[in-house]
Image (cartoon, rainbow, N blue to C red):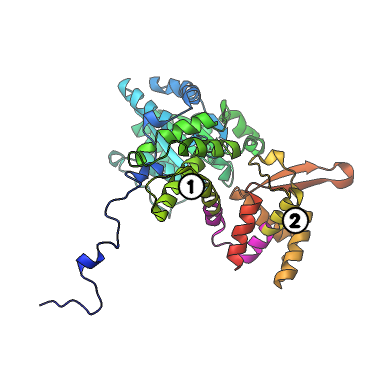
Amino acid sequence: MFHRKHGVQGMSDSDDLFIREDPIFVNKELLEISHLPDEGRIVGRDEEIGQLANAVNPAIFGQSPSNVLIYGKTGTGKSLCAKYVSRRLVGTAEEEGVDAVFAYVDCAQDTTETQAVQTIASSVNTEETEIYIPDKGISTATYYKRLWRILDQEYDVTLIILDEIDKLEDDAILMQLSRAGEAGKVTDCKIGVMGISNKIKYKDRMDERVKSSLCEREFVFPPYNAGQLNEIMAARNDAFRNGVLEDAVIPRAAALAAREHGDARKAIDILRYAGEIAQAKGAETVREEFVVQARERAEVDRFRELIRGSTPHSRYVLQALTVLSLEHNPEGAYSDAADETDGFRTTHVYDVYEQICRQEGADTLSLRRVRDLLKEHAFLDILEQSRHSGGSAEGSYTEHTLLEDPEVVRDVLAETVS
């Protein structure tokens, strides 16, 4: 016989502990960043989709697709459109009797040549090949040999999407993929590469040989405007229960996002947070006033996630750049466009960093180490670095521009200290 432990409430007493029916959301997954929308939900990118399809169109006849580089800010639909076109290509090629496949690599996750080629080989492999692709334990050269064998055995055409291509440690895999046919590594399969980058100047740092092979077609995805963001969010309003969203909520969220960044992912974040705020307040509807609160929360949460686990000196360096940014722009008017704001030289950042270290009672790191920390922040897209020439008198130098709202950075850094 079982006895209820002392102090544990009965089921009838705890019915109000959990919400059995969400009063705000009905399908919250539609508002998650990881959710890929259905075909009908891709808004404002018809022209870009058409251009990408035209570039890879030869693949449906078993011919070589053009290699493509896609540029644009975060949240402009680059990855979404690349995956959509690739999926459609595979289906259309099948109808034409052509065996096609596409592989997707997140280069922010797979930053080394070995990691990237392993991911490609693993994703295109099939049981029929009887080729083993281990997670690790074999050389990069062996991964390539097994990849070439898989491609020649199984496919007529392969499209490889390298997302955030600028995060790769070097150009080695680009050289291998773009010249595999020419070098005789693959004989029966045509390979096309779609590189995706948030950095418009990424091509400038590529090896010239890779550039000539890879940059056959280039496309720039512009930020979404308010009308497009409005459509994107309206296409997801079935994430909410009928009648829950007040009419002004989506237009206000779209206007805010368009004014600041034109980033669809951030806009969807704002909409989701507005619903969560309504939920937390016990409101029956998602009101326009919640949108402004949601925007602030979205910015703070996103940045907090970026710097989670960073070292004290990493935060001091970021704090130094934030202090300079706020001094330079005391009114607090913030633009997401880095080229509209003056950057600050490494030596200026280091001077303020030394002051912060003194205030915190910490020993300073060397200038070289601070340069490394600034590079790490640039890698996370917290700041942008640009090289300048000061002429024969000064030589070249680097300027650093904060990409985040400096007030948000200041507040989050204050939280991590307290």
Quadrant position of the N terminus in the picture: bottom left
- In magenta segment, residue 59: no
SS at mark 2 in the image: helix
Instruction: Give the extent of the magenta segment.
Output: 301-318
Q: Position of residue 27 (x, y in %)?
A: 33, 43
Residue occupying image coordinates x 66% and y 44%? 334
The image quarter containing residue 62 is top left
Q: Which disc is residue 377 wearing?
A: none
Quadrant position of the C terminus in the picture: bottom right
Judging depth in this view, the residue of 306 and 322 nearest the camera is: 322
Judge whether 306 appears above or below 67 on screen. below
Q: Are marks 1 and 2 in contact (CB under 8 Å)?
A: no
Q: Which disc is residue 349 wearing?
A: 2
Judging depth in this view, the residue of 396 and 380 nearest the camera is: 380
Relative to residue 256, is residue 3 drawn left or right?
left
What residue is disc 1 on? 290
Judging depth in this view, the residue of 311 and 409 nearest the camera is: 409
Q: Residue furthest left?
A: 1
Count residues near mark 2 (Cα–Cα under 10 Å), then give few for <14, some for 14-19, many for 20+. Answer: many
Type of amino acid at the residue the image marks with label 2: Val
Q: Residue furthest bottom?
A: 6
Judge whether 231 appears above or below 124 on screen. above
